[in-house]
Amino acid sequence: MRTERIAPHMIRVVFGGDGLADFAPGPYTDSYVKLLFPQEGVAYPEPFDLAVARETLPRDQWPRTRTYTVRGWDPGARELWIDFVVHGDSGVAGPWAAGARPGDVLHFAGPGGAYAPDPDAGWHLMAGDESAWPAIAAAVEALPSGARATVLVEVDGPDDEQAVSTAGDVDLRWLHRLGRPRGQAVVEAVAKLDFPGGTAHAFVHGEATMVKELRGHLRLDRGVPRDRMSISGYWRLGADEDGWQSSKREWNQQVEREQERA
């Protein structure tokens, strides 16, 4: 339907049309969809059918799948917002979003999801990089009046900060990378954080190595139970989503074994 550059490194694409007639994001603030990007020069079945494409085309011609958070959904207008991190011409989804025009068609699977802020939690910790911001922002917007939350978000610099509205009691801290290794600012900020009293409910997502360090810190140093954390790597530095998703389960299992031994 339209696009909007909402920050120097983020573009919002608003989808609409009859294809969203039955869409419903569910009760989760981290609802996500699997976007299917066609490969240039490949003819796909019409009407599009992913199962048929996979049956009839070699694997290297299948659409490329990228996972994105549902930033917003307006059922009345039938509009779906997806926010894309864009860093020049690198990647698949970012360049597509930068070049998207009204009338373009994109297929997707989903939605899925697993997390929403627990209304009975004593307080909420939300931490991540810009890839996690759409899910964090949706969670912040969903907080009820009086709900306490500390939110730590790492971005390149001040121009990448974004406003968000909430009824909750939110301490939002923007962490500027300014050339430092990705994730370092978030790890340091969580380590220095004074945890308030009450049961924490944590949402920590972003680059995988950052998430690994914070998972260990929260469980071993802070004593946050596993069932009180939604924590996972959305991406891994040096790997595209195809490579990361194929190794993610093994990576997570290795992390769990290491932390069980600690």
Image (cartoon, rainbow, N blue to C red):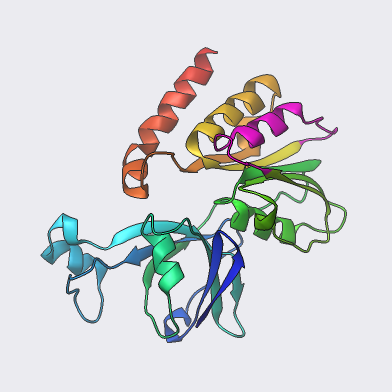
Task: Name the spot of residue 211 as percent of width and height, x first.
Answer: 55, 35
In the image, which residues are magenta? 176-199
Q: Is residue 3 above or below residue 218?
A: below
Q: On the rendered structure, is 24 left or right of 110?
A: right
Can residue 181 be found in the magenta stretch? Answer: yes
Task: Name the spot of residue 252 as percent of width and height, x first.
Answer: 44, 32
Q: Is residue 143 above or below residue 78?
A: above
- Foreground of the two, 174 or 169: 174
Residue ranking furthest to the top: 261
Q: Residue at x 37, y 74 (%)?
A: 106
Residue ranking furthest to the front: 179
- Foreground of the two, 168 or 63: 63
Q: Residue at x 45, y 84 (%)?
A: 102
Task: Name the spot of residue 101 as percent of width and height, x first.
Answer: 43, 80
Q: On the rendered structure, is 196 left or right of 20?
A: right
Task: Name the spot of residue 16 as percent of width and height, x first.
Answer: 49, 82
Q: Is residue 258 in sight in this rendering?
A: yes
Q: On the rendered structure, is 62 left or right of 91?
A: left
Can residue 137 be found in the magenta stretch? Answer: no
Q: Residue at x 70, y 32 (%)?
A: 190
